[in-house]
Image (cartoon, helix red, strand yellow):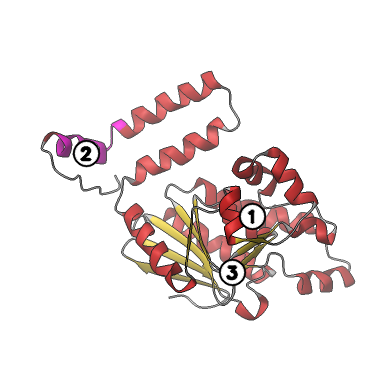
Amino acid sequence: MSTGPVQLEHHDQVATVTLNRPDALNSLNTHTKEQLRSTIEEVAIDPDVRAVVLTGSGRAFCAGEDLREHAEGLQAGRGDLGRTVTEHYNPLILALTSMQKPVIAAVNGVAAGAGASLAFACDLRVLSQTASFSMAFTQIALAVDSGMSWHLPRLVGAARARELLMRPRKIEADEADHLGLATEIVPSDQLLPRVHEIAAELAAGPTLAYAAVREALLYSATHDLPESLANEAKLMSRTGATADHRAAVEAFLAKETPRFEGR
């Protein structure tokens, strides 16, 4: 396991990335943002990783931007948040959403601001019973970042997203489930075991097919139906030529369970 504000652990083709600033609710100072980005980029290209888990240590998933560091920057005349969005948050979200493998957020506590954005950028969000979300941007007179304007409306609908962003509040796990923000809710002491069970299932699955599904969903969000149909045909050709597809067809004919190798 790596050390520092972001920890990385590998186990059976699953990489677990843990924000590790529990005393600061895993808020994102410059060092943490840089290490998180580099860690996500590292696991994205690691051929031995077939599923990724993102979580936080202590009682928070991630409280968003480190406002103490930001306040110091404002006092020193270097508090341009647009710069950190461009240099840190945008590349991080793109790395999360474009990697060719599934990503699960294990939301162990509060996920606020950019912390909520990180969770929404993942494929699945498994919440502990003590988890919560807060779209806290306008509470400190800020616009949204880290893909919040893209992901939230697609999860809860445009009207509800507008309300949650303009009238932010703490969204407890049960409400998050009702709104469509949670894939599953589990007792706090079962969160990581359950998430790693799901991650192990995904890591044993057809990795290239999962990647194609991620790519198709991203593409269709910004293209019309004819373009999306054409893209589906391209992706079908790609996945139809994989070893995993051939193995699955052979297993079907033999009435056996396929074994996927992620290629």
Residue found at the far top of this picture: 226
Mark earlier in primary sequence (1, 3)? 3
Res. 117 mark: 1
Query: Cβ–Cβ below 8 Å for labels 2 and 1?
Result: no
Instruction: Please provide percent x and percent y for residue 1.
Output: 43, 75
Report the disc number at residue 109.
Answer: 3
Image quarter hosting the C terminus: top left
Q: Which one is nearer the viewer's eye here, 196 or 44?
A: 196
Tell me where the magenta segment starts and ends, as one range.
240-252
Q: Main secondary structure of the magenta part?
A: helix
Q: Residues within 10 Å of mark 1 (few under 14, many from 20)?
A: many
CA separation in Å, label 3 and label 2:
39 Å
Up-down relation of residue 101 to residue 28 (above or below) = above
**Mark 3 residue element:** loop
The part of the image, by quadrant, that contains residue 117 is bottom right
Q: Earlier in the sequence, mark 2 or mark 1?
A: 1
- The reply to whether discs 1 and 3 touch (Cβ–Cβ < 8 Å) is no
Of the residues under marks 3 and 2, which one precedes in the sequence? 3
Along the viewing direction, whichever of 207 and 61 lies nearer the viewer: 61
